[in-house]
Amino acid sequence: MPWSLRTCLSSLSGFRDDSKLIGSRRTSVSSMTDVSLAELLASIEPLAHDAEVEAFSVRPIQGFERHYVGRNAAGQPSLLLGSGPGVFHVPVRLAMLEARFGSRHRIHPVDGEQREELLSVITCTSQDPQAQTYFLHVGETILRIIGPNPSLNDIVQAVQRLIEVFRRLARPASRSLNGLLGELFLIGVSRNVKASVEAWRSLDVDRFDFSVGDVRLDVKSSAERLRIHHLSAEQCKPPAGTVGLLASLFIESSGGGQSLRELVAAIEAALADRDDLILKVQETIAGSLGESLPTAMGARYDDRLALASLLFYDLAAVPAIRDGVPSEVSQIHFRSDLSRTESLSETALRLMPETARQLLPR
């Protein structure tokens, strides 16, 4: 019998409810505080117009007292990260982000005396409220990575990854929202979310969406309830000695369904002790959606339909162009109709290697 995941519907219900609770819990930068950076920032007023241009109105971050969240004279949200002195690092200026490292800055704490401190300052210069919210969200991950007492080099290395996220946000989307939702949905319902994220692609040029050990898995989502998917000849001939799987599911827009933001929050909650993997998720999403990310986070899809429609196929058995291709010809792409192809049974999936089963739903 094809594996349709009917037995997993109850677990999805819990997944959806948890995502709402998780979303509020994971906004805190640490278990030491229940206040998110966005909430802290909302309590900070910009400095008066006659204040110094380079001054910041700030609040310290509980559990990270050397670091602050605040606003510059223009009211733009900023992270101010404290460290000891270090070698000079060139400032960075992007379309939506500016960063300066290890310089003295004047701060005006909301509940304290103004003073100068040695700080690295990262400012979101975008006027888009959703971009500012995302800046603070990724900033929480950066804070957890560097900890309360980082060196200047620790800060530079972590902030470089934040910079890369915002570089990607300035580019056009590299893949569809539906395609990304399919991949994230499979991660969210997988038996081992950490292993799934570790196996997840880092770049859009990766041949398979998931690759680990002897397993190659690609996810194809359809908005038309038809299992007709775009594949490549290379995908349908996995390397010798590997297991090649195709996950096929339906992703449809639904006002009452789970949002991309809720799905990502649930995944991040499952990665609670692996901030490096949380940042990988944020980087990969930014690379996929590019400039459309801030608005796409609110998109909602029918998560019940996604689960009920999820089937797995052997990539070596799906309709494909495999033989008779000259060696000089490559990058062959085609549409494959799976309507007459038998999906893998529950028994077949249970007999998969452990590296494959940890990517499959609970």
Image: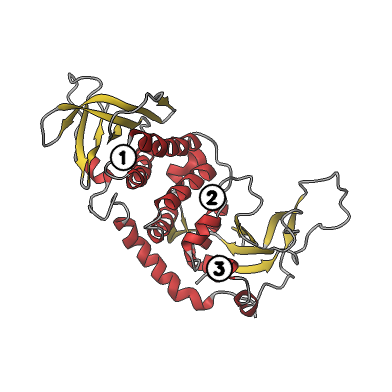
Give the secondary structure at mark 1.
loop
Give the secondary structure at mark 3.
loop
| Number of the label disc, if any, that sits on residue 293 | none
Residue type at mark 3 is Leu
Q: Which residue is mark 3?
A: 360
Which is nearer the N-term, disc 3 or disc 2? 2
Which is nearer the N-term, disc 3 or disc 1? 1
**In this orientation, which residue lies closer to the viewer: 27 or 201?**
201
Q: Compared to 168, does 296 lie above or below?
A: below
Residue at image coords 79%, 46%: 330
Q: Which residue is mark 2?
A: 177
Residue type at mark 1 is Pro
Residue type at mark 2 is Leu
Assess disc 3: are there few (<14), some (14-19) or many (≥20) residues with their C-alpha within 10 Å of its C-alpha: many
Q: Compared to 322, does 330 lie above or below?
A: above
Camera-near label (3 vs 2) is 3
Give residue 115's quadrant in the image.
Answer: top left
Q: Which residue is mark 1?
A: 150
Side of 176 where 234 appears, left or right: right
Residue at image coords 39%, 36%: 159
Which is nearer the N-term, disc 2 or disc 1? 1
